[in-house]
Image (tube, rainbow, N blue to C red):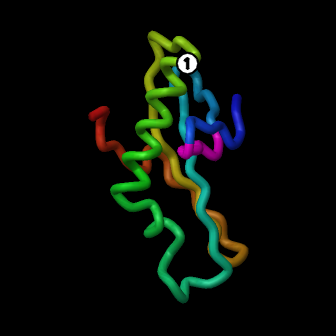
Amino acid sequence: MERNWQAGHQEIDLIGRDKNTIVFVEVKGSRTNQFGHPAEKVDSQKRRNLIKAAEKYIIDKNFSGYDFRFDLVTFLGEKLEYYCDAFWDGYS
């Protein structure tokens, strides 16, 4: 549905739909794991920012009656990993 959607300084890499679920996807990559796995870059602050951006998107697009979830895609070298329902901090 969207790619690189921005709400101020916050960005959601991909937004899609899986049946009755709006899916917000964060994409992180690295050539090596020298500084840790790319998933480790999605810390609590990043999750809070994604949730705030998702809330803005939901309000701006006037979505109701949908479920929502946050997925994560990581690239480490040439290896791709997809984490469905990667985190949920709830709306705060």
Q: Residue furthest front?
A: 8
- Disc 1: CA contacts within 10 A as few (<14), some (14-19) or many (>=20): few
State the count of labels: 1
Q: Residue at x 58, y 16 (%)?
A: 61
The C terminus appears in which quarter of the rendering? Answer: top left
Q: Main secondary structure of the magenta part?
A: strand
Q: Residue at x 62, y 38 (%)?
A: 6
Span shown in magenta: 9-14
Residue 56: say if magenta: no
Residue position for label 1? 60
Whether residue 89 sits left or right of residue 26 in the image: it is left
Q: Residue at x 56, y 50 (%)?
A: 26
Q: On the image, which quarter does residue 91 sit in?
A: top left
Q: On the image, which quarter does residue 15 sit in?
A: top right
Residue 64 in the image: x percent, y percent? 46, 11
The N terminus appears in which quarter of the rendering? Answer: top right
Whether residue 38 sits left or right of residue 2 in the image: it is left
In the rendered image of this protein, does residue 53 appear above or below residue 46? Answer: above
Residue 80 in the image: x percent, y percent? 65, 65
Q: Residue at x 44, y 23 (%)?
A: 67
Residue 14 in the image: x percent, y percent? 65, 41
Amino acid identity at mark 1:
Asp
In the rendered image of this protein, does residue 38 appear above or below residue 33? Answer: above
Q: Secondary structure at mark 1?
A: helix
Whether residue 2 sits left or right of residue 66 in the image: it is right
Q: Residue furthest bottom?
A: 34
Residue 11: say if magenta: yes
